[in-house]
Amino acid sequence: MALKATIHKVQLQVADMDRHYYADHALTVARHPSETDERMMVRLLAFARHAHESLAFGRGVSTEDEPDLWLKDLTGAIELWIQLGQPDEKSLRRACGRARQVVLYNYSGHGADLWWEPLAGKLAGLDNLTVIDVAADSVRALAGLAERNMSLNATLQDGMVWLASPEQSVEVELTTRQTAR
């Protein structure tokens, strides 16, 4: 018998002062059995940072040809492809060929350095790729916010991100390794 995804209901209020975007989002997040709370919360962080009425979650961890999140225009063209983890060079090149902009969130601490070292030069030529590291301490703190039913506030200002539940607040430390040109 196959394990089923765990469904999380999220009320996410986004106040992005940098983009002048203010909205409430009622999200249903399916957490794959192999997905950790850390990864799921990084997906929610990515949603908050790129929040848009048309931003949608992909089909999940087990689907290789879809990102974790994406934004399509009215014609179906992919405007934004958001991926998490440490994909190989080939899959990043494929994503950059399919989408106008690709953002990768890496959240594995020291493992991110080991992953990035051999790829940095090869990925530098991908003009539409942004690579962002989420600090390991921030990821652990975000996992502490995970519940089946969540009410979260995301505040973004001057490149800083705060994600808060009614009980606690997490300041998320982000480091940009590569910025799309």
Image (spheres, rainbow, N blue to C red):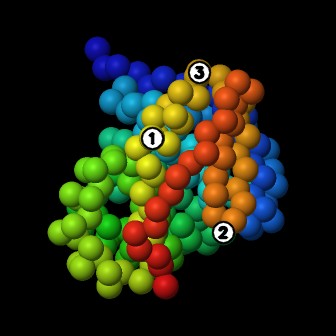
Q: Quadrant of residue 50?
A: bottom right
Q: Which residue is mark 1?
A: 137
Cα–Cα span, label 3 and label 2: 32 Å
Instruction: Give yes or no for contact between labels 2 and 1 (Cβ–Cβ under 8 Å).
Output: no
Q: Which residue is mark 2?
A: 74
Of tags 3 and 2, the one toward the viewer is 3
Q: Which mark is residue 148?
A: 3
Q: Is residue 1 above or below residue 43?
A: above
Residue 63 visible here: no
Q: Amino acid at mark 2?
A: Leu
Residue 160 visible here: yes
Instruction: Give yes or no for contact between labels 3 and 2 (Cβ–Cβ under 8 Å).
Output: no
Identify the residue at the far top of this view. Answer: 1
Of tags 1 and 3, the one toward the viewer is 1
Front position in the image: 116 or 32: 116
Residue 132 pos. (x, y %): 44, 62
Q: State the residue at coordinates (37%, 42%).
A: 61
Task: Label 1, secondary structure: give it.
Answer: helix
Q: Amino acid at mark 1?
A: Asp
Dot placed on the residue nearer the N-terminal end, 1 or 3: 1
